[in-house]
Amino acid sequence: MAASTSILADKLHEYPQQGVIDGTGGGIASVLDDCLNKSGGVLQLLHRYAGRTFCTPGKRIRLDAKSYYPDYMGGTGLDELWMCCTVPIVTGVIDTRTKKAPFREGEAHVLTSSGQTVSLQDLIAANPKAVIGEKVTAFSEKLFGYATWPIVSKKFDNLNPIPDHLHWAKWEVYDINSFDNPGVSPSHYHTTAMGLYSFVTKEQFLACMKRFGKGEYNGIRHLAPHVMMQLDNGFVMPNGVLHSPTNLCTHELHVTMDEHFLAEDLTLDGRIGAKDAFYACREEDYPKAKHEDWDYLVEKFDFAANQDPDFVLKNSRPAIPAKEFQGNGVDAKWIVYGDFLGDQKCSILRLTVQPGGKTTFRPECPALFHTNGGSGRVGKLNVRYHQNMVLGEIYPEIGFITQAALANGGVEIENTGTEPLVLTFDFPQNAHSKTPGVTAAK
């Protein structure tokens, strides 16, 4: 690490022992070079955890029992694992040690060769083309105005379904898999609320919303069909559609933003206030002057999208073979694929390497990966799946394959253990010249 690189006073709430490199100062280029050389262009990302004051952990993000409720988070439990977000998230939680929101909460950080940490976004800014490549750089600059990784990967693990809500501009995709939900039978009955029944009228919906926060439950969930999620398959949730995700641990991708509108005022976790319905709503999507103007909501609401009789058929993503990555003891499946909302939003690939198996992984685009089982290596980075992780300790499970690695012919993946090595790869928008699964899905 260059001597001119300084260390910030603030620490990541999970890793107070690790220094955080000031990526805006001198020496960041050499830090990036060290990170790329350390593991052959594969960056090791830290587990970033977060909690919501209105949520209760489902305890499936594999922390040890004592780590779910850190004593510095004011009673809030950790129910989210953020893996590749390039901006701080906002949960409303206050770190009692600092009396402020946790420093860079949820933002992706890389472990350096010196044992310090550095923001993934700082490394991208230092050399976008080496980290995320020209195509992703151009796309993100057009979308956000600067070079960044344009997709968020996380695991959401609440004990109960969260309030029925919608996102005006943020689409999401789901991968509810058996690795994150051990012991759950394929015949489970965990359901996700989606949209509104076709018989629901504007008047019924308006009456429901006008009851928000007044007396008894406003009843929005009674107007919504509920769908069982199939383990190890994918599902797409377009923006503008009401939904309440199942009470299973969900691997989720969405565009880099976090805005929502709550439509339900009473959940299994307790009552929420009417003002919370508009928490995180962006001004351009839902003007503050229109908050609690339920008539405005009804006129803005997309009834056609929410009452589409073919919604489940159109948005389900049964896993399909990814033949281009299969062979020699390697199985690969597309979990999320195809186009939605007009183009290729993102995709999820699950790769399984049998013991002793080895393959060279050459996708077209950089990708995040996380480990679902087994042990092995990705490039020079050794990875291993862990249980009962202790908050504050560092575990090699999550990585980022950079453009620099792909430019050198890809990365070799090898199973060095006795159990299948299972890796899941998250790709951003327009990552593939040929959209995965288009032919197979028809």
Image (cartoon, grey):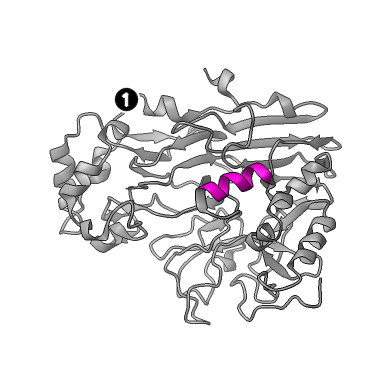
Image side of residue 125 versus residue 237, left or right: right
| Magenta residues (range) | 134-142
Q: Is residue 385 visible?
A: no
Q: Which residue is mark 1?
A: 309
Magenta-span inclusion, residue 140: yes
Foreground: 102 or 301?
301
Q: Quadrant of residue 45?
A: bottom right
Image side of residue 359 versus residue 172, left or right: right
- At horizontal 59% and vertical 28% (from top left) the residue drawn is 435
Q: Majority secondary structure of the magenta segment?
A: helix
Residue 112 lies, with reference to residue 408, above or below; the image says below
Q: Residue 153 placed where, x, y %?
A: 57, 49
**Crowd around label 1: few <14 · some 14–19 · many ≥20 (10 Å):** few
- At horizontal 58% and vertical 33% (from top left) the residue drawn is 335
Foreground: 339 or 284?
284
Q: Residue 336 placed where, x, y %?
A: 56, 34
